[in-house]
Amino acid sequence: MELNIMSRSVAERGTTPTGARIESVSAAENPIIAGMYPDPTICRAGEYYYLATSSFEYFPGAPIFRSKDLTNWSQIGHILTRRSQFSVGDRGPSKGIYGSTLRHHDGRFWFVTTNANDYEAGQLLVSAADPSGPWSEPVMIPNAIGIDPDIAWDGETCYLTWKRLSFTDGDLELVQAVVDLESGEIGPTYQVWQGTGMTAAEGPHLYRVGGYWYLMLAEGGTERGHTVTVARSQHPYGPFEACPQNPILTHRSLGHSVQNAGHADLVQTHDGGWAAVYLGVRARGSIPGFHVLGRETFLSGISWVDGWPVFDEHRYHLVPDDHGFVDDFTAGRLDLRWVVPGGQPTDAVALSADLGLSFTSSWRSGADLLCARVRDLRWESEALVEGDVAHVLRLDDRHWYGVVIRDGIARAEMRIGDLSQSIGSVEVDGGAIIRIEAVSPATLNVPLGHAGPDDIILSVEVGSIHHELARLDGRYLSSEVASGFTGRVLGFGSPSGHGVVRSVRYKPAG
């Protein structure tokens, strides 16, 4: 049995595999980095822009990208590649690496973030001469408990600004202190601008532009009420004057195809202009709309009007990226797309030029799965497998669908919260192709139907016979149902520890 593997070379950007040209699309409606890449932070060094995002429980953590033009991005690595940088904690979903700040200062790159698995340790600061790594061991800032840290320099003085927050008591305040980047010690802590009064004022970023210091926040929560607000001062510590046009970015109560827009970061462009990256979601299906890819990274132009930043969402256009890939795991190392929730790849899988991907443990929790982010609204994934193998579509460890082969039986299985069910099965003798597809829903929207964002088809091919085992409602693998901060991933594990994945093909559809 053979998996129909297309050429390894990715189609030239801007053309289809047949050579037909793909037209550019507006960055106002299409992400520059699709899939679960939220809370973007950006800086420029020389001719390149660099962008990093949150990664939550997935390891390696904090993926980092590079671009020359802000619209075409390539991943160059992860910032947190060693468990000494990013402790495991209790392995829970939507923990791990939260909002961050990436900056280039005096020839060195700096990255400050929160590891929610080690929350009481304070903020985590690493640095590197080369953004592709290696990054340093962390300097912990133990007296800065909270989330979404920012660093900004005024001469030799570095200011740390962050959101004090308790996971049990809720929002506290936005604060700032001078920080020593070598020791992690901070000076006296004081309040800064607390926003316009909306809920969940967080994600601070501080910039000096002209004669002012600007403090930009996310407000309204990272859901449908998400916004960007800004204030300015003649000093980095305030007092701050709020922009009279706040919020300066929001899609709340609009019929926009991108919702939850917010958590922005600014960068000055090569020509002296300005741009911003921000997160948004592409919700689909019946009310209230369901987003399944997580929060994605979008791009906007920035104009300065009367001393205030103004978002120009339609300034940039981009050519949609081809996220398709084929992997037979014979390269001797894992591609950057592969991550593990709550664990690390070396504890979950092994690579072999003869076998491909095998498993070093049985699938008992999220930490035993090797995963890749889903980056398209419609797609199909095929895996050529032998032995006991599970291929799942996962939102978190309590919300997933998949095909699980064990002891010669392939079953469609699902878990939604506390409910687990096996739906259909077929005998498997030897190898098989497991297929998962995200297709358009078979029903109309409410009130004429109950359409979710998609339907998920689980099937297996044995010999030349295709067996569809289940067609499931995609709503249950959405953030609106499962909650949390992450998006869908494709995962591979083994229910017994004895299985092989020969190759995987992921292909966007339609």
Image (cartoon, helix red, strand yellow):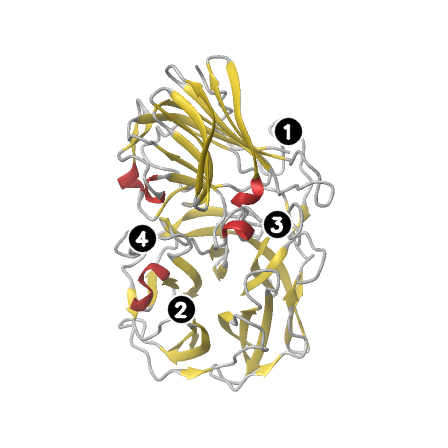
Q: Which residue is mark 4?
A: 134
Q: Give the image quarter of residue 409.
A: top left
Mark 2 vs 4: CB contact within 8 A? no
Mark 4 vs 3: CB contact within 8 A? no
Packing grade of label 4 (10 A; few <14, some 14-19, many >=20) is some
Secondary structure at badge 3 equals loop
**Residue at mark 2 to residue at mark 3: CA–CA distance:** 30 Å
The amino acid type of the residue labelled 4 equals Pro
- On screen, 336 above or below 311? above
- The label on residue 282 is 3
Q: Which residue is mark 2?
A: 168
Residue 124, percent from left and from top: 33, 65
The amino acid type of the residue labelled 3 equals Arg
Secondary structure at badge 4 equals loop
Q: Nearer the viewer, residue 341 or 26?
A: 341
Quadrant of the snapshot with the C terminus? top right
Secondary structure at badge 1 equals loop
The amino acid type of the residue labelled 2 equals Thr
Which of the two marks, 4 or 3, is nearer to us in this view? 3
Which of the two marks, 2 or 3, is nearer to us in this view? 2
Q: Earlier in the sequence, mark 1 or mark 4?
A: 1
Packing grade of label 2 (10 A; few <14, some 14-19, many >=20) is few
Q: Earlier in the sequence, mark 1 or mark 3?
A: 1
Residue 222, percent from left and from top: 54, 62
**Residue at mark 1 to residue at mark 3: CA–CA distance:** 28 Å
- On screen, 75 above or below 392? below
**Residue at mark 1 to residue at mark 4: CA–CA distance:** 38 Å
